[in-house]
Image (cartoon, rainbow, N blue to C red):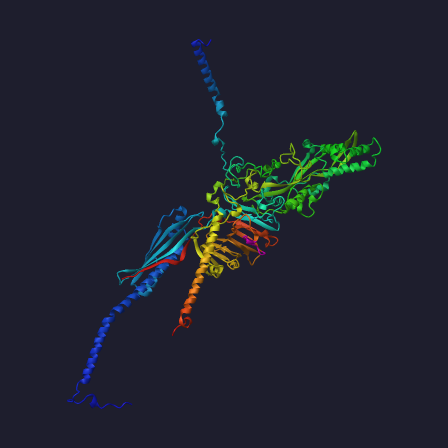
Amino acid sequence: MLNDPRLRKIVIRVVVVSFALTLLVAAPYIAKRMPKGEDGKKSGSKVIRYGTKKFSWNTGQSDETDSTSGDISAKQLKPSFGNLPNELFPGNRPFSLDFHKLPLDYMVPQQPEVTRTVLRKIKQFQVAELAAFEAQQSMAKNYERSQPNGGTSNE
Amino acid sequence: MRPEAPLGLIFPPPGSGRRGFVLFLVCTLALVMMVMIIGLSRHKSGAVLQLNRTIEQERAVTLAQAGVNEMLASVKADINDRETPIGKAIFQLWKSRPAITGPNVIFNASFDANRLKMTNQLVEETLGSRGDVSGQLSLVVTERVAGIPRPAYLGYVELIARAKYRNYPTETKVKERREIRIVDLSDPFLDKYALFVKTFCRSLNSPKKRIIVQGVTTNDPGKYSFAYFGNRSYPACPEFPDGSKSAETPPVILDLDFDKDRYLLGSFYQPGAFRMKDSRLSQLSDGNLFFVNPPVAFSKVSGSFSLTTDFHKTSELVTIYKSIVDSARAGADQEGTLSYMIYQDYLKAGGNPANSEAFRSLVNTLMGSWQYQYGYTDYTRITQDNSFVSQHPFVGIFDYFDEVAKSNPMRATGGKMPLLFGEARNTPLYVEGPVFLRFFKIAFTDKIEVNFDLKDQIVPVSFPAVAMHYEKTPETFSGKVLNPPVDSRTNRLMSMPIEHFSINNFFFGAGSISAKTPTAVKGGVEGYDVFPAFDQSLRSIAYYYQTADEFIKDRVRLIDGQKTLDLDGIALIAGKTDQALDLSGVQKYRGKGKIILGEGKCNIGDLAPLKPDEDYLGIYLMYGRFVIKSSGPAADIHASLVATTCFNDNSQTSASAEGGIEFDGKSVNLLGNLVVDNLFEMRGMPEGGHLRIVHDPGLYFPEYPVRVSVGQTRSLLAVDYAQ
């Protein structure tokens, strides 16, 4: 039947027009059902709700294992307590764990090796000063010895 | 009396041969003298002139030097005041933190005669109106010291004074340089902590020696104080065989005191009593629970259990069963009676309740009638004299204490947690370290009256309450995981500690975790590896002393009749182990500074700034302890106190070498912060004493933590004499 080019042309046209019409009718519905982007998720509140945003936090583990978001950690919170933590500690406290509010220098400690270096230097400094003091005293003694009459006036 | 010479010999009569000789002699002598006088006068006149000139020059130099001194005094007075022009220049430098590639003049000022009043008054007194002294000041920054959280700057102040005489066309110049050190005394990482304790302290929960921390309060919910409690030197025990180095991290447990900490519990604080058949027991529980769950039908969870495996080890049930068997034994010889059947079943089961049909029937009946109850209490209520938990059926929690006495005695100790959130418990504080909250669940099934169905015979029996015993590893129905759970918070029936919630849950929501290491975005260090920031080049240190006595002699002044610590930047005291830095006699300080003591203790009592808004004191003991010496019962200290020793391996230490605080019978009120290795169980603190730390916002968020120290000695002195 579709061997007839005129008929085939009509069928194609009908199919295309029906598809376009269907798309037009369904467009608002599809738009509603489309997944929202990241912006759509942001609420007006500045407070981070726990379990909604990951923050970078050092737990002494590798990056793969220390995804320490606000999600309940199975290691720390035993699962046997069910909803107790949520009842005991409602998550709507207005204090966020967004440590980035503090400047970076509040977050990064100085390495202990610096303190060790300082200790070594202080020790060296102390020894050097003591040696200098002893040298000064011995010079003073030598000077006194070299003076006639034990360093007293020669009048 | 000398005989008079005859006149004729002196004046021989005219005509004699020696006439005119004396006159000639006199004239000759006079001539010689005149020649000598003329010669001497000509010869020495230059020297006299030179002497005169030298005197004038030295006088000019002295006056110029006075000018330099007056300018120097002005610099010292103004350089740390950011309202003055020179102070503003320093403030701008601190704010912009520029890189320094060479000598960079950041401030210039001229001092005319009117600005050098004292010097020119001296000129007036010395020379009259024949001269004046003027000067010029330059502040030059030569170097930026990096490697510390906030850079320090080194440089010099150059002072040039010019003394000018009206009589001389040229002027006498004196140039002097003194080194300056511009240091930012803040240590942002450490200053954010109100309290930092590295080593495990087993008396943190002591109800008689309280730690009270009042964090900063700001309008910004993202800014709050921090505290760190480490577990270094945690005692080795079967649960943690290698102490703090065990595979699992030993916890620092803080015991809730529900009465005092009720604010923290919010709406979960619902004190009440168990609803029990025995009103005496109900009354006993009253006031000892901060949350009571209404009775729940046991049948709701009975599907989770096996009659053959989950009940035969429960002592209460076995006792009931055995008492039934014993009572049946008497009539067991009469076939067809209930007693006979029970006893036959007992024999058939070989005495093992697990195999007994009668036991299973008993349990099945009980499960249909039991009412399960639980409530929450705290360590204080459990351990007090005549505690309600010593009464059956509240005794299930004792199995926990029996168990931890063997596996980890540290868990058996407790009390009331420190007041980390202020006395009103309403100030957020982020707690770092493996710190967990603890309270306890008390659970049981109340006594019941049931009709015991034994093979077509109904026997009314009264069954006592059954305690839900703690089981580390589930052995009975009490410890078995329920599916489905009783309710959203209970999936095991047993009495148990609830000790796995981060203390941060209170203010930071239910998902908060206990961070083992102190704050760091990435690659942070362990708590025991945290030390105050230090310029390892030591170039930012303004004063160096060999001994603490040298420091006291130099830096303690008598101001208004009061011994006052005069702070001026960073002072390093090498110190000796057996010599203490004794600040106990000093009650005031002024200026901004940090005292770093290499070795030795520091005796400290009441110590406050003269100007609380401006002055700053930090004391860092690198190998020593603070010893509280105060005339009153408590020492009031306004300072940042740090006592922590750096070892080759900071993860393990000997307590004798650790830094800390010795209370010596006193309480401490500290406005600032405290960083120590060890609190030494607060052993010197009196019973009823306290360590109250109010985190100083001026320390955490300092407005201007900068001190400029001007060198005590000249680094250059040059004199240009007038010609």
Picture coordinates of residue B293, whole percent (x, y): 66, 37
Q: Is residue A35 visible?
A: yes
Picture coordinates of residue B276, whole percent (x, y): 71, 38
Name the residue at 17% across, 85% down.
B20
Picture coordinates of residue B516, whole percent (x, y): 55, 43
* Towards the viewer: B546 or B349: B349
Which residue range is magenta in the image?
B656-665
Residue A16 is left or right of residue B494, and the answer is left
Q: Is residue B657 magenta?
A: yes
Q: Is residue B590 visible?
A: no
Name the residue at 62% across, 34% down.
B488
Name the residue furthest right: B334
Name the residue at 49% across, 27% down.
A35
The C terminus of chain B appears in which quarter of the rendering? Answer: bottom left
Q: Is residue B43 magenta?
A: no
Picture coordinates of residue B107, whole percent (x, y): 36, 51
